[in-house]
Amino acid sequence: MSNSLASRFGPSPSLLPRPQRKVRKPSKRRDKRVTLRAELLEDRRLLAVVSEMEPNDQLAEATPVQLETAFDPRILSAQVAGTMTSADDVDNFTFSAIAGDTVIVSADDLIACLK
């Protein structure tokens, strides 16, 4: 029996031939490129909010409101934001319309504003 290190533990790793590394071909899964697509949506027009301007308690001081078409060109509309400072607060607004036009006005949170 030989007492050399090589006989006891085997040859030094630096003396052993290195195994050849296989060149990995890129997998098809990794090579897939993602294509982003954008879709144009129909035109949308958002209504601007008209803020109430004080003083507007008298008709001569009325806050002007510009009516615009939003979804249907036959319908003009606007959104107005304001606050009621007291139960007897009067707010006047003015807009242009043609005789015979139908005007619909709605208000939200009237009770909450008066509390």
Image: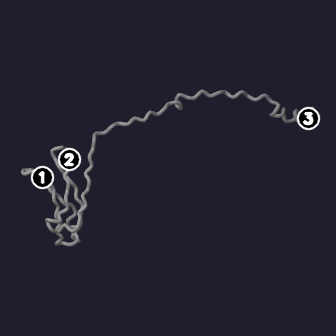
Label 1 vs 3, first from the N-terminus: 3
Q: Residues within 10 Å of mark 2 (few under 14, many from 20)?
A: some
Q: Residue at x 83, y 34 (%)?
A: 12
Q: Residues within 10 Å of mark 3 (few under 14, many from 20)?
A: few
Residue 106: image quadrant is bottom left
x and y percent of residue 47 in the render?
25, 51
Label 1 vs 2, first from the N-terminus: 2
Number of the front mark, 2 or 3: 2
Q: Residue at x 24, y 58 (%)?
A: 50
x and y percent of residue 108 in the render?
21, 61
Element at badge 2?
Answer: strand
Residue type highlighted by circle 2: Thr
Residue type highlighted by circle 1: Ala
The residue to which callout 1 is attached is 97
Residue type highlighted by circle 3: Ser
Residue 28: mark = none
Distance between mark 1 and mark 2 Cα atoms: 13 Å
Residue 4: mark = 3
Residue 66: image quadrant is bottom left
Label 2 vs 3, first from the N-terminus: 3
